[in-house]
């Protein structure tokens, strides 16, 4: 009851509050909720196995309870009057404080009777190292927190007549002794760095789960018997959000569980027969050889053996993620008796299975089907994607778990129970390769499983993934392909009968939009289904404009509107585009001339079956990916296109100028030694062009290994650079790669490093904005006004801007939409148009 004082003498310490402090959950109860979730997780076989791997030995049941007692202390800083006052009426006169800072300050109040003596019980033993444990505990909001000056402690914990924090601390201490009696007889496990990093991530996960009021209703007055309530609620919540044991498969983990096809293809069979003891598997197989189904077969075998409990399927692009997401959702219905809903791990979206969610106030979500399935929890925040039973997303979501960025510990721990599949792993970006490699090795160290898949992985990159010594060009070029690599080395895969194709490949001098359009129009008028892939959005848009001015009826269309395919469309419009592209030049597309123009978004995952490909010059591994969109299926072809054809657009004055300036995504932009650009390795591009001009017919996949090594192997590129006088440029390219790997190394989260330095300072993370941007995270995600109609007549909700268009924006701005007559989107001083060509900056270069 209120008194004349703004405070209440009998006020309890709260851990969660709502309605301006009118509704509270006792601090001891919230701490119990989180501790109960952490213990519930550690009692699940997969989480326990990962904890054992991090610790280096078996964790005992008594130690598990002690870790729960540690988790109970995660919000000890909330005892501080300056924190409690956040839910008190105005007039208290206290400086409001954060609970993590106050948690550290609480540790600076040395008292033998702290927590009614429970602290001394919990932290006894010479190897306990309380400061290390507290650093892990106070990282539960996603990153380490620096220890403040201890002299501030008394000011943070003043003695007040109205609120007795020491009495409330005693309540917590008595609860610790009663609810975790093992702390009287059992010591904490050793505070090794690997285990502390693991514990930090697991506690972050437990805190997120235990803070959900819908699962842990508020109980304001301290109840001595609350622990039993918390245990029941925690076990139920862990199960219903799919952090517990996986659902049963529909049958044995055999090929028939995955597909209706009578027999698996060679690459699929090679993966399917691998022993489950193999933790790192690399599958090299051509595009269209069924690698996705091979991954699902691997998953089913590991699930059946109890080796994994989840799946994260990582792909290079968001477009690829959307396509694979649909396929995996369908596969899950076949594989499981109660199929989980695959989460689409793309920031700014909330998609679980086939259902989309919309964010409401108070962090709640409304799902399109009107259901509120607890397991959709993982789809509602990007940091929780990897905690899903099954998630499909981009590689950056996985790689963020290996960098010093917020929620890295959570991501790493959440991923640890899963089979990690990285599709189309390649070596185009040294920074990304280094960050992915670090996360893979961390995942393997926790006992996880990894399947790497690629159609075009060069030996230099493959040896880096497998930590092998370099070899010469001849040796690497003569290795069998396709193949699967395990701890036993290379295992050749039998050639697939009638799977090969003979592709006519020729270069074309000139790559203007007009020349690309003329080539496409000529082929389409002869009845060909033409795929045009440009290196930049601006070139794709210009090519679209050139075709549209002459024959708009031949272009890809959605709802009768001619358009093209690239990344700068709203997600809802991209889904329509994806379907339209497959209808136009996919497996079941009708005969008849038509043109699909796009960018790298068309390289992977879409099931395309074009008659002819017109593409810009690009690195060999990328070119082979693009060629994979040609003649993918056996089907009728128009006259003159019975064999696949690829025309590669090149600058008409050779590639030497690209060593001085960039053009059309190739070469280095001027302005510094960092060689900024898309495809900067000009020697590699020249090696690709040499193969095109030397071998006008490519036998795919028989020549894949030869082609890739000729254009990516260090020995080959060194010789080419020397012969063309590009030695200095080649050295700069190699220096750029080394610098990017070094930069990545400085930003990696070293899980073998102590969380506290010898001097007592916490090893905190640097500012992570640049790290995230370098990883490929898109820029600001702009929320559009309700009812905004997109290009093709369907409602759209948001648009993702490229990072370099987002400077000065936070994503919190209110977008204004007008029609003049084109759609205009304005925020602050920035303006964009949105139409059939996609999003464009108003009045500026859209490259």
Image (cartoon, rainbow, N blue to C red):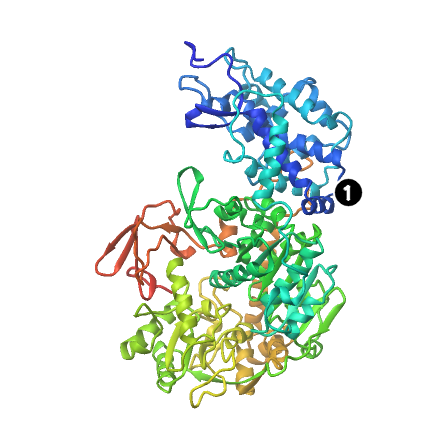
| Quadrant including the N terminus | top left
Question: Which quarter of the rendered picture does the C terminus lie within?
Answer: bottom left
Name the residue rendered at 47%, 44% in the picture: 372
Residue 172, quarter of the rendered image: top right
User: In terms of secondary structure, where does tag 1 sit?
Assistant: loop
Left or right: 300 in relation to 820? right
- Tell me the residue at 62%/57% (across/down): 420
Direction bottom: furthest residue? 640
Residue 742 in the image, given as x and y percentages of width and height: 61, 56
Q: Is residue 220 above or below residue 348?
A: above
Residue 138 visible in the picture: no
Q: Position of residue 559 (x, y in %)?
A: 31, 67
Residue under label 1, please give it: 58
**Residue at 63 percent of width and 50 percent of height:** 246
Looking at the rendered structure, the number of numbered marks drawn on it comes to: 1
- How many other residues sit within 10 Å of disc 1, few (<14), some (14-19) or many (≥20)? few
**Residue 681 at what x, y percent from top left?**
53, 70
Q: Could you tell me if residue 824 is visible in this image?
A: yes
The residue shown at (75%, 25%) is 184
Q: Position of residue 524 (x, y in %)?
A: 37, 83
Q: Which residue of the protein is positioned furthest toward the left in this rendering?
A: 820
Is 290 placed left or right of 793 in the picture? right
Q: In this view, does 710 lie to the left or right of 626?
A: right
Q: In this view, does 758 lie above or below 169?
A: below
Along the line of sight, the residue nearer the viewer: 440 or 297: 297
């Amino acid at each position: 009851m209120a008194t004349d004082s703004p405070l209440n003498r009998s006020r309890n310490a709260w851990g969660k509050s709502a309605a301006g402090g009118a509704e509270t959950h006792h601090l001891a109860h919230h701490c119990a909720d989180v501790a109960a979730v952490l213990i519930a997780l550690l009692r699940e076989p997969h989480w326990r196995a990962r904890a054992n791997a991090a610790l280096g030995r078996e964790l005992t049941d008594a130690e598990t309870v002690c870790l729960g007692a540690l988790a109970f202390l995660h919000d000890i800083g909330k005892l501080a009057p300056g924190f409690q006052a956040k839910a008190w009426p105005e007039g208290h006169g206290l400086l409001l404080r954060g609970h993590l800072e106050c948690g550290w300050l609480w540790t600076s109040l040395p008292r033998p009777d702290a927590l009614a003596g429970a602290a001394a019980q919990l932290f006894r033993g010479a190897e306990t190292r309380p400061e290390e444990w507290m650093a892990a505990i106070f990282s539960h909001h996603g990153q380490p927190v620096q220890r403040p000056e201890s002299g501030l402690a008394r000011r943070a914990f003043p003695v007040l007549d109205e609120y007795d924090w020491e009495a409330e601390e005693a309540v917590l201490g008595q609860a610790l002794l009663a609810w975790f009696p093992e702390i009287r007889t059992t010591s904490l496990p050793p505070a090794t760095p690997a285990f502390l990093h693991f514990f930090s991530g697991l506690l972050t996960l437990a805190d997120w789960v235990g803070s959900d009021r819908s699962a842990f209703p508020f109980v304001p007055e301290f109840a001595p018997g609350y622990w039993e309530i918390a245990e029941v609620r925690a076990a139920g919540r862990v199960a219903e959000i799919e952090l517990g044991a996986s659902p049963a498969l529909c049958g044995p983990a055999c090929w028939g569980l995955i597909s209706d096809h009578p027999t698996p293809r060679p690459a699929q069979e090679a993966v399917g027969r691998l022993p489950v003891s193999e933790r790192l598997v690399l599958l090299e197989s051509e595009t269209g050889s069924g690698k996705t189904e091979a991954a699902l077969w691997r998953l089913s075998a590991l699930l059946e053996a109890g080796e994994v409990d989840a799946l994260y399927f990582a792909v290079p692009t968001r477009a690829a993620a959307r396509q694979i997401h649909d396929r995996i959702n369908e596969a899950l219905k076949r594989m499981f008796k109660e199929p989980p809903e695959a989460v689409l791990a793309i920031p700014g979206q909330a998609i679980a299975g086939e259902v989309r969610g919309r964010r409401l106030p108070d962090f709640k979500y409304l799902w399109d089907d009107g259901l509120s399935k607890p397991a959709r929890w993982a789809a509602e925040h990007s940091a929780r994607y990897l905690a899903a039973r099954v998630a499909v997303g981009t590689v950056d979501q996985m790689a963020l778990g290996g960098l010093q960025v917020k929620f890295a510990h959570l991501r790493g721990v959440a991923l640890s129970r899963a089979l990690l599949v990285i599709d189309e792993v390649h070596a185009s970006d040294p920074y990304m390769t280094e960050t992915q490699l670090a996360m893979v090795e961390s995942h393997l160290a926790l006992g996880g499983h990894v399947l790497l898949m690629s159609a075009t992985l060069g030996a230099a990159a493959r040896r880096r993934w497998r930590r092998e010594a370099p070899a010469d060009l001849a040796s690497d070029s003569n290795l069998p392909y396709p193949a699967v690599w395990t701890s036993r080395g290379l295992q050749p895969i039998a050639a697939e009968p009638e799977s090969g194709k003979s592709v006519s490949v020729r270069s074309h001098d000139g790559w203007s939009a007009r020349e690309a359009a003329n080539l496409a129009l000529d082929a389409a008028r002869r009845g060909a289904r033409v795929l045009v892939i440009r290196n930049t959005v601006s070139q794709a848009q210009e090519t679209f404009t050139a075709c549209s001015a002459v024959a708009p009826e031949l272009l890809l269309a959605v709802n009768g509107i001619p358009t093209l395919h690239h990344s700068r469309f709203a997600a809802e419009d991209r889904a329509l585009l994806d379907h339209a592209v497959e209808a136009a030049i996919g497996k079941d597309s009708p005969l008849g001339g038509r043109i699909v123009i796009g960018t790298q978004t068309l390289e992977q995952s879409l099931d395309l079956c074009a008659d002819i490909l017109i593409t810009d010059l690009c690195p060999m591994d990328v070119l082979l990916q693009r060629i994979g969109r040609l003649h993918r299926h056996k089907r009728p072809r128009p006259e003159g296109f019975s064999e696949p054809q690829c025309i590669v657009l090149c600058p008409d004055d050779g590639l030497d100028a690209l060593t001085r300036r960039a053009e059309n995504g190739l070469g280095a932009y001027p302005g510094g030694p960092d060689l900024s650009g898309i495809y900067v390795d000009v020697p590699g591009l020249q090696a690709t062009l040499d193969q095109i001009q030397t071998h006008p017919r490519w036998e795919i996949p028989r020549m894949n290994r030869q082609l890739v090594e000729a254009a990516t192997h260090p020995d080959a590129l060194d010789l080419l650079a020397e012969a063309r006088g590009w030695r200095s440029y080649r050295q700069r390219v190699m220096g750029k790669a080394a610098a990017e790997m070094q930069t990545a190394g400085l930003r990696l989260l070293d899980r073998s490093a102590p969380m506290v330095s010898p001097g007592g300072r916490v090893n905190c993370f640097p500012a992570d904005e640049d790290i995230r941007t370098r990883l490929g995270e898109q820029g600001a995600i702009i929320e559009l006004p309700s009812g905004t109609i997109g290009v093709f007549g369907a409602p759209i909700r948001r648009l993702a801007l490229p990072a370099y268009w987002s400077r000065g924006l936070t994503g919190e701005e209110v977008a204004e939409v007008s029609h003049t007559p084109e759609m205009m989107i304005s925020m602050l001083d920035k303006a964009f148009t949105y139409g059939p060509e996609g999003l464009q900056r108003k009045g500026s270069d859209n490259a």
